[in-house]
Image (spheres, helix red, strand yellow):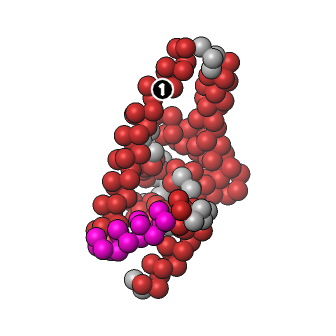
Amino acid sequence: MIYWQLFLVFAYSNLIGFGGGPAIIPIIHHDVVEKYEWMSDQHFSESLALGNALPGPIATKMAAYVGYEQAGIIGATVAVIGAIGPTMLMMFLLVSIIMKYKHHTRVQRLTAFVLPAVTILMLQLTWQFFSSSYEGIGLFWTIGFCMASYVMMEIWKVQPMIVIVLALLAGGFLFA
């Protein structure tokens, strides 16, 4: 029964939680802390903080952690499948439909009309990241790191992962 519950918690939260981690975490919190009482609020908060320190989508990391805590490796596997499986299947279906009809004018218009919405989402995310950085390290360092990152990635063609690691190292040395 625990495997089915783990699968449902993470499948449900990822299917209805539009907006990524910030939208999904409250749903996961409700099920994990309040409904099933698998964790205390404190334990959930600590695991969320740990998950945010690691790369990758937070919902998948939370699924792995909660699943492992409740039912070991199999529980973690089931929870992660619940977190990514339904969305992955829907993406395969959507991509196959779009690829089948990609030369139709309506499908081309459909994808063209989605781009402005995606642009706004990316701008919102950029503003949130900029604001968080500004609050954490100030305007001078935020602009400096933005400019340095831009130069490295766009002019010098340094891989983004290397830029991220360098920023982590610089932050560790400058702000330790």
Residue 34 in sight from this viewpoint = no
Q: Is residue 120 above or below residue 34?
A: above
Task: Tell whether 50 sits left or right of 90.
Answer: left
On the image, numbered disc 1 is attached to which residue?
Answer: 112
Residue at image coords 37%, 47%:
123
Query: What percent of the width, then of the height, locates residue 66?
Result: 56, 55
Residue at image coords 37%, 40%:
120
Q: Quadrant of the C terminus?
A: bottom left
Query: What percent of the width, then of the height, locates residue 134?
Result: 30, 67
Q: Name the quadrant containing residue 133.
A: bottom left
Q: Name the quadrant containing residue 61.
A: bottom right
Magenta residues (range): 137-151
Task: Tell whether 10 sits left or right of 80.
Answer: left
Q: Is residue 150 magenta?
A: yes
Q: Quadrant of the N terminus?
A: top right
Q: Is residue 27 magenta?
A: no
Viewer-proximal residue among 76 and 135: 135
Q: Is residue 168 above or below residue 81?
A: below
**Tag 1: residue type?**
Ala
Task: Tell whether 175 sits left or right of 87.
Answer: left
Outermost residue toward the front? 155
Query: What percent of the width, then of the height, locates residue 54?
Result: 55, 64
Residue at image coords 63%, 17%:
103
Q: Secondary structure at mark 1?
A: helix
All told, the count of numbered labels is: 1
Residue 108 in sight from this viewpoint = yes
Residue at image coords 68%, 50%:
77
